Amino acid sequence: MSTREQRRDDAAIDTPGGFLVHALELKHDAAEHYAQLADSMEVHHNPRAATLFRVLAAASDALARSIAAHAKGMTLPRIAPWEMRWNGRGGPESDDCAGNEVTYRMTAAQAIGLALHNEQRAQQFFAAVALHAGNARVRRLAAEMRDKEAEHVAMLEQMLAKQQAEPGHIVADDLDPPHMPA
């Protein structure tokens, strides 16, 4: 999608209700996505990555509750999934499984890197809405969400720096790897 198309899509989120629907969907989707990744890491005996993904799921749930508080008393519009205004198949924080980034043997540093990428995409989404929306309340709400995502980005950058400073954590060899066709 070109920058011009992206601007048009971002500007299309021009009502507080429409913005809140997008923000709620983004955070609910992220929480569910991170919970699923945590479950998968637990099944594959990768507790460090599982714990990180649980923390991220909880943070997304908390932010969704904050967004819901803004929507209290409002009747939010229904928006079909294909009418959501973001790039990719899923929301900005959950469209990472298309590539090879997610693996059951990922280290905590790799998990943090994946989450950092997702949080940066969410921050960029909210920043674009804050910049291009014609409605002042939408711009304020989007700027608030952009700033909260910036806090998540900063937290993950600190976590990544700490992980990189510690001796490398290597996931143990898989003694029963999946049988994948060559």
Image (tube, helix red, strand yellow):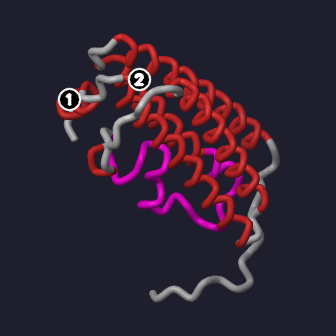
Judged from this view, the residue extending furthest toward the top is 136
Vertical order, 111 against 181 (above or below): above
> Residue 74, image x and y in percent?
45, 27
Work out whether mark 2 precedes mark 1 in sequence or the reverse, and give the earlier one. 1
Q: Residue at x 40, y 51 (%)?
A: 90
The label shown at residue 107 is none
Residue interval drawn in magenta: 86-112
Q: Residue at x 81, y 44 (%)?
A: 166
> Residue 124, image x and y in percent?
42, 29
Which quarter of the picture shows residue 174? bottom right
Judged from this view, the residue extending furthest toward the right is 167
The quadrant of the picture occupied by the N terminus is top left
User: Is residue 98 on the magenta stretch?
Assistant: yes
The one of 138 and 127 positioned closer to us in this rendering: 138
Q: Could you classify mark 1 by the number of other residues whose Cα lies within 10 Å: few (under 14), some (14-19), or many (20 or more)?
A: some
Q: Residue at x 44, y 52 (%)?
A: 95
